[in-house]
Amino acid sequence: MTTATTGAIDCDMHPAVPGMHALLPYLDDHWREQVSLRGIGGMDPSSFPPTIPANSRPDWRPTKDKPGTDLAMLRAQALDAFATRYAICNCLYAVQAAYNADFAAGLCRAVNDWIAGEWLDRESRLRASIVVPLQDPALAVEEIERRAGDARFVQVLLPAGCEMPLGRRFYWPIYAAAERYRLPVAIHAGSTFRHATTSNGWPSYYLEDYVVQSHAAQAQLLSLVAEGVFTKFPGLTVVLSETGFTWLPQFLWRATKTWRAMRSEIPWVDRAPADIIRDHVRFTLQPADAPPDAPALQQAVEQIGSDRVLLFSTDYPHWHFDGVQAVPEGLSADLVRKMLIDNPLETYPRLKETVQ
Amino acid sequence: MSLSSDLREPATRPQARLQMIDCDVHHAMRSETDLYPYLSAKWRRHLETYGARRPVPYVHSAPYPKAAPALSRKDAWPANGGPPGSDLAFMQEQLLDRYDVEYGLLHLLSPSGMDQRDQDLGAAICRAINEWQYREWTQKEPRLKAAVVVPGEDAAASVAEIEHWAGNPDFVQVSMITHSIEPLGRRRYWPIYEAAARNGFAVGLHTSGYNGHAVTPTGWASFYAEEHQEVAISQQAVVTSLVCEGVLARNPDLRVVIVEAGFAWAASLLWRLDRHWARMRDEVAHLTRPPSAYIGEQMWFTTQQMDEPERAEDMRRIIDWIGWDRLLFATDYPHWDFDDPETAFKIRMSEEERRKIFRDNARTAYRLS
């Protein structure tokens, strides 16, 4: 079957952990016993409750179990339907939200081994991100090193809402390891709930929580640039996932304007933030948050000032479009081709090597 | 319009011929004791002993050191030795006369009452500020219009303050800080919006204040270079809250102005709001129309700090997307990031477009005659 997305690389999809029971075989003895002894329940993220419409398209929802738990469905609905060559699994089970760093590390090992055993081993088109315990960067680095030998792991996954902005030096060992192993770092929508989802406290509705995810992503970008992460780790690529991109032009203009006025405060930022971001940061497509008239989308993308920053994604099984219209109307054919294949290959060195 | 502005040489400052309404002007106190004549002896003693206690680490300094002393332009310090914005005559000369300002809308940043941890003190400070604005500023200069500052975390006290000034033409809006303890659309603030709408005031939300929350939803930024943009981003959350929690829908007469956060972000925020509302509108059944429909009728954005597209002409598209009737020009005088009305926009505008942004939209938003 040929579709508009044939041969594309889907840079954000979400196989779901069915529940803690699925991880038990992958936990070490201590944590398996603790989970059973203490009745520790599932870790579905409050940022993405599986029953909410946005988090599963009606026709992608299985009759039983949670959306994203069935490999046969994912094959048919995501891989076959979009004829994707590869798809990158970002598991959103909220293991990064545990307060106990050792528990988080045990859970991250389990999730990564579960992804490898239950998904990557069974479907050769799938790739995955390494989930890490960002509560303790030393443990996070251990986990990256433990899984980095498996070339099917192509990036490191962090949540957008953390305890501290991700540019802080505390997190730098993670970036050093990611750069060493040529793994981009994805910052994906979702909060560990260390802070309210807005800097004004907790909104009442899920709709608001979802909309303001893009603000957390913007805060992370500002932090990564201002703290000098890209100066220190010139080989690092960051992928912002599921947080939109139509906000990017204004964000770039403002960041550069502020930097011009305030660069004496952050002298290690030796180039305009807009240029740093265009070189180092990529954005997954869905949700596209497109304007109501299609031509305006192309105009908004042109305002970004680069055709290299967008990466195709379906965000399966989340619901942002119907049918197989994952590529919104209005984008130029040239941009679409780059977004579907060229940009992902350039972003993920491990995928590029597989292809060659 | 004054005679002198009619006779001004158009060749030297062509654009100044259009009178403008400046929607963000900062007056200031020479010192905190300027407020004392309007405070009771009890509160004066309290301030001298316990001070203004806000959820910030320093008693006097800003948590994030700012770009410039008093946040201000170097040339804005008046000759009489007071801080920028504290000398009416100098403000008249440097802003109101220089740019032919028809009205200047005042926003006082310090002191503030709403983020006082002692709520009685907060209410007393707000009342004193409003008296001070009335006697020292608007009564002396009719081109200046004040905002009724309210202790927004205490809705009952805020409503009382609004009603105290209701009908006074020197006040055109109610002002709250934007870093509130809860999102500003939450129910605890509703009586304030109802009182503002009932009494014909707009609500002006100038980026300001402290609430004890981290400045980002992912913790504390290290630098002012971040914080300066973060506080503008937080205004996007304010807009999201006001529309999604139903404040605009429930108060169709309410007019809200977002001040000092730029505006180009509004286009993509409206798209994002509408898209996700369409998916989850059953959660917010109080919204019978897309979020952009309410914002397009009841909300305005001041232009400062001016967004600067890399290709200047993109500004026209941005304004097309937001709507030429939604923007209100503001200088932010006397602050360091002041926008000069003669040079702030890098695109050519028609006479009608200029009239809207520099004057007519503000007349509508603030019901100025």
Image (tube, coloured by chain):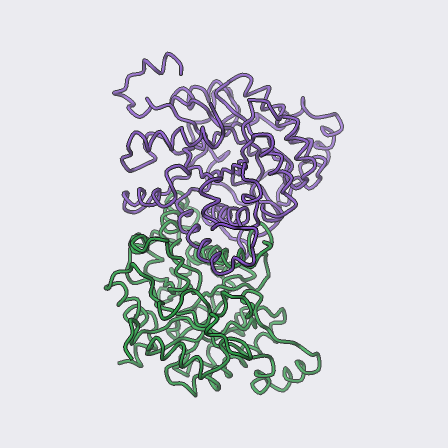
Chain colours: A green, B purple
Q: Quadrant of residue B360?
A: top left
Residue at 44% from the left image edge and 30% from the top image edge = B362
User: Which residue occupies the extreme left position in the image?
Assistant: A334
The image shows residue A325, relative to residue B239, as above or below, that is: below
Residue at 48% from the left image edge and 85% from the top image edge = A118
The image shows residue B6, relative to residue B253, as above or below, that is: above
The image shows residue B37, relative to residue B60, as above or below, that is: above
B99, A324: nearer the viewer: A324
B187, A257: nearer the viewer: B187
User: Which residue occupies the extreme top position in the image?
Assistant: B3
Q: Is residue A307 left or right of residue A46?
A: left
Q: Position of residue B328 (x, y in %)?
A: 42, 34
B287, B209: nearer the viewer: B287
Q: Position of residue A324 (x, y in %)?
A: 36, 71
Q: Is residue B112 left or right of residue B311?
A: right
Q: Position of residue A108 (x, y in %)?
A: 54, 77
User: Which residue occupies the extreme front position in the image?
Assistant: B288
Total marks in image? 0
Q: Is residue A48 left or right of residue A294?
A: right
Q: Quadrant of residue A124?
A: bottom left
Q: Is residue A249 left or right of residue A146?
A: left
Q: Position of residue B1 (x, y in %)?
A: 40, 16
